[in-house]
């Protein structure tokens, strides 16, 4: 705020509020000045606020006013002249309500908190390591108990169960379990297709541990490796290796994407790589930086990113290989350790 001459910020993104205060509820507004903080919520969270962020003054709104109405009252006292707000994390209805009643100046803040969140401290990195460790154990448990009759949806449910059994808070996103031709859909939602109906299945899954996400993808081959699958798999894994090798502090995120994309294009599958190479992970499953052709981000030590090139052939299926990578002071560290050579992906069912 000092860098732009600002004096106050209204935080409405709940993940940002959690990052700044430790509060894990679902409804709040955080007001920040250069010296003070005030969190506004409702009666459901009065005790929770006292437990999770006792050092921050809290206000519990009355039941006859909305959160925004209560916030505007406090804005008039806390920061009567101006307030920056999170442009990407406030609804038009909320903004109109603030604009109608607040007499100070409203200014867009940009992604101030998101930039802080992009670089993890040691505590956050340890939590991500634990999340990844649980996630890998989940996968190993699930694939050991596959049968030809088990469906995509049943595998997704087992991922959720095993994650919670091992101490996770749940999945960091809805698992993608895509048998055969369904794996050509990058964000396929599991259905009632049994894995015995094809030779391979794509599994993209993650868990949350104390708020921090993991995100991995592996292919599972349940019979003889199809020649076409082998072809695109070797291209995808070569692309992933080239991209990971590129990762170090100061490197443009777009150049990491380019390292993978060049290999896939050279193999003739450029049009079948239909998404960005990766993204940051942390309290959200998708956060800064973005590893994409148009990204303006530069890599910084402490960031944790996914690297997940994919090739998707309609009518046949697709391949995606994903690992989580920490940018270190002198390079990178691949935090995930599940085997990924194609021969290691064969599972007897």
Image: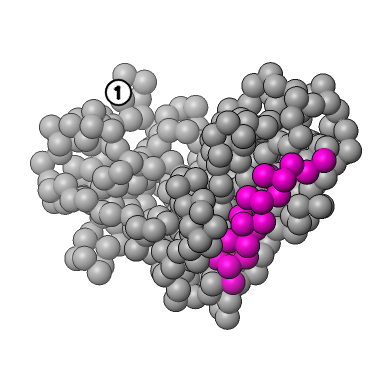
Q: Examine the image and state in which quarter residue 154 appears.
A: top right
- Describe residue 115's horizontal placement relative to residue 90 as left or right: right
Image-quadrant location for residue 312: top right
Which quarter of the figure is the N terminus placed in?
bottom left
Which residue occupies the foreground of this view, 163 or 73? 163
Q: Which residue is mark 1?
A: 65
Residue 117 covered by magenta stretch? no
Along the line of sight, which residue is nearer the eye, 17 or 235? 235
Q: Residue 14, percent across and down? A: 43, 41
Q: Residue at x 26, y 45 (%)?
A: 87
The range drawn in magenta is 224-245
Q: Determine whether the residue tagged by mark 1 lies in a helix, strand or loop.
A: loop
Residue for point 74% across, 42% down: 226
- As drawn, the residue found furthest toward the bottom would be 330
248 versus 130 height, above or below: below
Does the magenta stretch mainly form a helix, a strand or a loop?
Answer: helix
Residue ID at (28%, 54%): 110
Is residue 18 something one can see in this rendering? no
Up/down of 84 relative to 178, above or below: below
Instruction: For label 1, count other residues whose C-alpha is less than 10 Å away and answer few (under 14), some (14-19) or many (20+).
Output: few
Please tell me in which quadrant of the rendered image residue 207 appears.
Answer: top right
Q: Is residue 264 left or right of residue 127?
A: left
Taking the image as shown, residue 266 lies to the left or right of residue 190, namely: left
Residue 15 horizontal/vertical position (percent)? 46, 45
Rendering coords of residue 196 (x, y %): 79, 26
Is 231 covered by the magenta stretch? yes
């Amino acid at each position: 705020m000092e860098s732009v001459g600002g004096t106050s910020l209204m935080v409405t993104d709940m993940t940002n509020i959690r990052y700044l205060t430790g509060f894990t509820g679902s409804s709040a507004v955080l007001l920040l000045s250069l010296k003070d903080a005030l969190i506004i919520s409702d009666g459901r969270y009065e005790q929770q606020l006292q437990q999770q962020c006792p050092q921050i003054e809290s206000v519990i709104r009355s039941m006859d006013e909305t959160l925004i109405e209560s916030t505007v009252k406090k804005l008039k006292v806390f920061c009567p002249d101006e307030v920056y707000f999170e442009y990407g994390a406030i609804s038009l209805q909320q903004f109109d309500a603030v604009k109608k009643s607040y007499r100070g100046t409203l200014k867009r803040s940009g992604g101030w908190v998101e930039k802080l969140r992009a670089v993890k401290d040691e505590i956050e990195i340890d939590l991500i390591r634990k999340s990844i460790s649980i996630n890998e154990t989940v996968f190993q448990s699930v694939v050991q108990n596959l049968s030809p009759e088990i469906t995509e949806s049943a595998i997704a449910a087992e991922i959720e169960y095993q994650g919670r059994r091992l101490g996770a808070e749940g999945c960091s996103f809805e698992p993608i379990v895509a048998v055969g031709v369904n794996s050509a859909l990058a964000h396929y939602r599991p259905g009632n297709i049994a894995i015995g109906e094809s030779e391979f299945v794509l599994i993209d899954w993650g868990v949350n541990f104390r708020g921090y996400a993991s995100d991995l993808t592996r292919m599972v081959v349940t019979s003889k490796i199809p020649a076409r699958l082998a072809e695109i798999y070797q291209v995808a894994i070569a692309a992933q290796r080239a991209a990971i090798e590129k990762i170090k502090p100061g490197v443009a995120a777009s150049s990491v994407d380019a390292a993978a994309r060049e290999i896939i294009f050279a193999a003739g599958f450029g049009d079948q790589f239909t998404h960005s190479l990766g993204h940051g992970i942390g309290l959200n499953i998708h956060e800064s930086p973005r590893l994409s052709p148009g990204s303006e981000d530069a890599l910084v030590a402490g960031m944790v990113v996914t690297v997940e090139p994919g090739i998707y052939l309609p009518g046949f299926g697709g391949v995606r290989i994903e690992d989580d990578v920490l940018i270190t002071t002198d390079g990178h560290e691949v935090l995930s350790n599940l085997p990924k050579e194609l021969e290691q992906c064969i599972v007897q069912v």
